[in-house]
Image: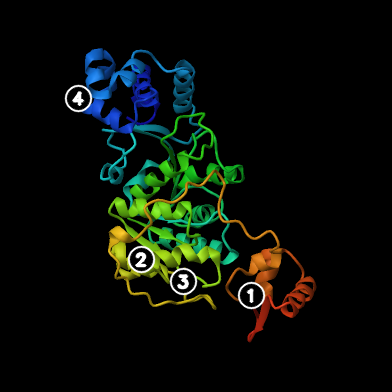
Amino acid sequence: MAGSEHWTREELAAWLRLVETPGVGRQSARRLLAACGSPQAIFEASPALWRSLLGPAAAQAMGQPPEGFDRLLECTWRWLQEGEGRFRHLLVLGDADYPAALLQTADPPVALYAQGRLDRLALPSLAIVGSRNPTAQGAETARQFAADLSAAGVVVVSGLAAGIDGAAHEGALTGSGGTVAVLGTGLDHIYPRRHLDLARRIPDAGLLLSEFSLGTSPVAAHFPQRNRIIAGLSAGTLVVEAAVASGSLITARMALEAGREVFAIPGSIHSPQSRGCHALIKQGAKLVEQTQDILDELFLLPRHARPVRGGSVRSRPGVADPATEATTQADDLFPASAPAQSPGSGTAAPADEGPILQALGWSPASLEVLQVRTGQSASELNIRLLELELSGEVARLPGQLFQRLPRA
């Protein structure tokens, strides 16, 4: 079942009640469906069957609709009907349109809210994730890799978060592959709010996706759950920039657990935002220098169909190029756990780091590039860059390039 034209209100009510009943998680819901065949049959079954499959507490909760259920049902029914020209769907286990890749994972969602083009779910896809506070270079790299992959017909999957996620979605919208944004909120609660315009543009060339019911606000515990869907939808996950303890590494671990490839882009040894990627590479993730590396590894497309326009780390001066030998077993690739990120969290820039150092990141940049990144005039930048040179924080390189230096 998909849009409202395929649902009766009674069918919708049964599915929503199944996934919203307190104490009945995804695993329990799948167990009930396997035993009874449909949500309607589940709620027609005896309490004795519920107790045998769920235990007494959850079986008791099954006896009546959860609090606020009538309001949720009405809201969801209206949402499915009032698409405003942008198709809205509720995909459930057993649907022909349900993402086949998720069925191959250990914990597929029971239901998914979707808005946009369902055909994106049938195309080859790659997840791009990374820091919510990337360097300017990192954001540009994510955008260019996503644009090149999308131009080659690959769907870019990410989480609509600030930073690398947003840059990846923006880049993917320029190509034929488009993008899938997996939210950690209901589809009617876009988070962060700065991506409201981006979220409005995505359904025209891609898809918004969430397992959380309408009205669900940002909750920290939801984002790791969202990450398993990002990893499960994709043939592989590319980490662009990440600190060692970050949600991006959680996504990478989930990709590995789902049997998918993990890729990482190297960066400066001085940048905290590169340390997570370097840790992945040391432990067996595939080092990526250009988009072609991913296309060769995963999609085996003919070379004439691979328009790589410059999504390459090697083409950008000053980025480290470590030759890492991946000898570690995949099971040892990631730490057993990483702290969950609160909504909007990430590795922030130091409080005393000014806008020019932030704009420089850890790769050399020209005066013209810094003008674009900071919005300052050439004369203002020259004065400030000279001050940073004298303080030992910036070095002037041949070719009128500027390089940030590590602090002692």
* Foreground label between 3 and 4: 4
Instruction: Tell me the SS state at disc 2.
Output: loop
Residue type, label 4: Ala
Q: Give SS at disc 3.
A: loop
- Discs 1/4, front: 1
Give the residue displayed 21% in from the left and 28% down from the top: 34
Q: How far is mark 3 from mark 4, CA to CA?
A: 51 Å
- N-term-proximal mark, 1 vs 4: 4
Earlier residue among tags 1 and 3: 3
Residue 307 appearing in the image: no
Q: Earlier in the sequence, mark 3 or mark 4?
A: 4
Q: Check disc 2 and report the residue beneath it.
A: 283
How many angstroms separate mark 2 from mark 1 (CA)? 28 Å
Residue 174 vs 322, above or below: the answer is above
Residue in the picture at 60% in, 56% down: 348
2 and 4 marks in contact (CB < 8 Å):
no
Residue type at mark 1 is Ala
Give the class, few, some or many, for how many residues have Cα within 10 Å of label 4's Cα (few <14, many ≥20).
Answer: few
Q: Amino acid at mark 2?
A: Gln
Residue carrying label 4:
35
Query: Which is more N-terminal, label 4 or label 2?
Result: 4
Residue designated by label 1 = 408
Image vertical order of residue 59 relative to residue 267, above or below: above
Question: Residue 392 placed where, x, y %?
Answer: 70, 78
Q: Residues within 10 Å of mark 1 (few under 14, many from 20)?
A: few
Kindly identify which residue carries mark 3.
312
C-alpha span from label 2 to label 4: 42 Å
Please name the amino acid that badge 3 sits on: Ser
Q: Nearer the viewer, residue 301 or 259?
A: 259
C-alpha gap between disc 1 and disc 4: 64 Å
